[in-house]
Image (cartoon, grey):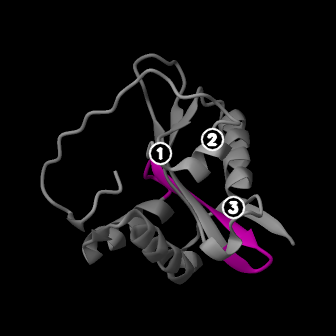
Amino acid sequence: MALTIRAAASGDEADWRRLWAGYLAFSGSELAEDIIDLTWKRLIDPAAPLFARLAILDTQLVGFAICQEQLATFFRRPICYIEDLYVDPAARGQGVARAMIDDLIALCREKDWDRLYWYTEADNATARRLYDRYSGTDEHVRYKVNFGAVLKSGNPA
């Protein structure tokens, strides 16, 4: 088993869309096609703060981490937010998610970013077992106000 993690490239679109459809189904969401198109364009735009790291197992794309580089008021250096992390069900249990998080930690160090953070659903016990190896949860509670409905149903954010 050869696992590599790398940046998304324009030739990855079809494989990313396959995984993205799986992610949306997993999260119980549907997005308008124009939002999916826009997301892909942002992921491969070097000027956009949104980027994707892809997990390749042997020759198959099996996972992605979609992240944002952000500036923040409490830090001198940028921080990195993992917005979405997904592993194809057929590749789960093989260390892919852990490898993607480790890759992002290395990327943060390489770029001299100050912090890596992410959220998950409280009832996502499988993911939380992995995430708890990196850090405990903090005392924050998230609130959100939605404007405009880009989602057809569900809510991945």
Q: Quadrant of residue 1?
A: bottom right
Residue drawn at the location 29% of the way across and 71% of the way down: 30
Task: Look at label 2 and name its amino acid.
Answer: Tyr
**Circles 2, 1 touching at the beta carbon (< 8 Å):** yes
Q: Nearer the viewer, residue 48 or 122?
A: 122
Residue drawn at the location 41% of the way across and 72% of the way down: 25
Q: Main secondary structure of the magenta part?
A: strand
Residue drawn at the location 59% of the way across and 26% of the way down: 114
Q: Position of residue 64 (x, y in %)?
A: 58, 62
Q: State which tag comes first along the sequence, 2 or 1.
A: 1
Residue drawn at the location 46% of the way across and 47% of the way down: 123
- Label 1 residue SS: loop
- Label 2 residue SS: helix
Q: Is residue 3 left or right of residue 14?
A: right
Residue with the mark numbered 3: 6
Magenta-colored span = 46-61
Residue with the mark numbered 2: 131
Q: Gap in Å between the C-alphas at discs 2 and 1?
A: 9 Å
For the view shown, which residue lies furthest in the left direction? 148
Q: Gap in Å between the C-alphas at discs 3 and 1?
A: 23 Å
Q: Position of residue 122 (x, y in %)?
A: 45, 42
Residue 101, which numbered label?
A: none
Q: State which tag comes first along the sequence, 3 or 2.
A: 3
Residue with the mark numbered 1: 120
Task: Look at label 3 and name its amino acid.
Answer: Arg
